[in-house]
Amino acid sequence: MAKTNSPPAPTIPLDLWRELYQAAARFQLLAPWQWMDDIHIFGVNNEHGVRLLTVLGGMGEVFGLASYRGSAGANFLLRLRRAEFAPESPDARFYQDALLVDFVPGKDLRKAERAIIQQIDFQPLTRKPRLFPEFQSHKPGYVPWFIDETEARLLLDDLRKAVPFAELLRTNPAVYVSRQENEFPFLPASGSEPLTLDQFEWHTISPVPPPADPPVDTHAFDLPPLLALPQPPQSAWELTAFYAPLPIGEPPRPYFPKTALGVDAATGMILAFQLTGPEQTMAQTAACGLIQSIQASGYRPAAVKLDSINLIRALQPLADALGTKLLQAKSLPMANEARCSLEAFSRRS
């Protein structure tokens, strides 16, 4: 969380807050994590969009509900299930598209949350331990943040649907038996009460590749002065782009800046360090880093190594215009070492 110059929390009507806290309290009182774990994923598709929901608490650390939104959210959840990265991985925070409600001691609540709880006079239904709902919005490239009104309505709908589903699963524990790994039950958009198993539709969700960055527009750069610079025939650089872990607290919510590093492949010397905001693609950030590296070094490289096929494809028009060859590499040892040094420095500062 950004510690300074953070924008204010979004405004949500108090009546909606009351409904959301009441729904969270009922979910907390049910405590479905006692019989559900991360394999019990279920889907919702209605006026609030498509999402996959999972109850948290199987590991005994965080208890609550996660709602993964759209294709980006589903892809992230499927990657977790395939163990492509651990939930505690530092990179995980950069790619989640999800809403989360968990339950924390009052002392751990943020100031804005304590103010809302006081305004609506909310008290937890459980006393031991005395835990309060905490709501968080996760979006790719952004710092986990307060939910807005649209997200509050979505999460309210999810909590209200999670309770009857969890109750049904408690009396029907074999619901997922004989189902495929990525086959999930979807709750009916308008089902009758009480909820029954025959109301579900089962869908197989397959991961889809993230959308590729479009080719970089070469007209965005003043190339003639760069083309006049020398190009040593054996010169080779490493170029990488990633999310920096140091958040920037600008409205409407803090974000992780995209970062490009240009590094001399032979010496490891950092040639450029470029930061951009959410409006720039990762490829545009990398392109700015490449141009800045040329300007700082005073020459054009003969070759640039990258470990991302997405960046190679998006940067190809710019590389062609510069007369530079792009090479795909399995790893970028010099760039990765420079990245680790920068991240270690940011943690100390």
Image: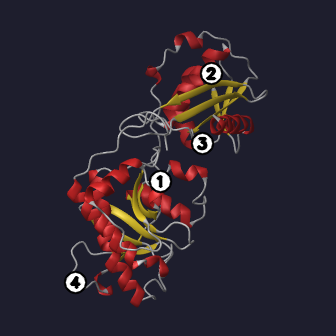
Task: Identify the disc placed on residue 193.
Answer: 4
Cβ atoms under marks 4 and 3 closer than 8 Å = no
Q: Quadrant of residue 307?
A: top right
Q: Disc 4 versus disc 3: distance between alpha carbons?
A: 50 Å
Task: Identify the disc placed on residue 25.
Answer: none
Cβ atoms under marks 2 and 4 closer than 8 Å = no
Crowd around label 4: few <14 · some 14–19 · many ≥20 (10 Å) = few
Residue type for callout 1: Gln
Residue type for callout 2: Ser
Left or right of 132 in this view: 47 = left
Give the mark nearest the N terminus, 1 or 3.
1
For mark 1, what is the residue?
96
Q: Quadrant of the C terminus?
A: top right
Q: Of tags 1 and 2, which is closer to the observer?
A: 1
Q: Disc 2 versus disc 4: distance between alpha carbons?
A: 63 Å
Cβ atoms under marks 3 and 2 closer than 8 Å = no
Foreground residue, 257 or 103? Answer: 103
Cβ atoms under marks 1 and 3 closer than 8 Å = no
Please name the residue shown 49% across and 40% down the image.
2
Q: Position of residue 183 (x, y in %)?
A: 44, 74
* Residue 36 higher or lower than 93, as above or below: below
Give the mark nearest the N terminus, 1 or 2.
1
Q: Secondary structure at mark 4?
A: loop
Q: Secondary structure at mark 3?
A: loop
Foreground residue, 130 or 33? Answer: 130
For mark 2, what is the residue?
293
Cβ atoms under marks 1 and 4 closer than 8 Å = no
For mark 3, what is the residue?
308
Residue type for callout 3: Ser
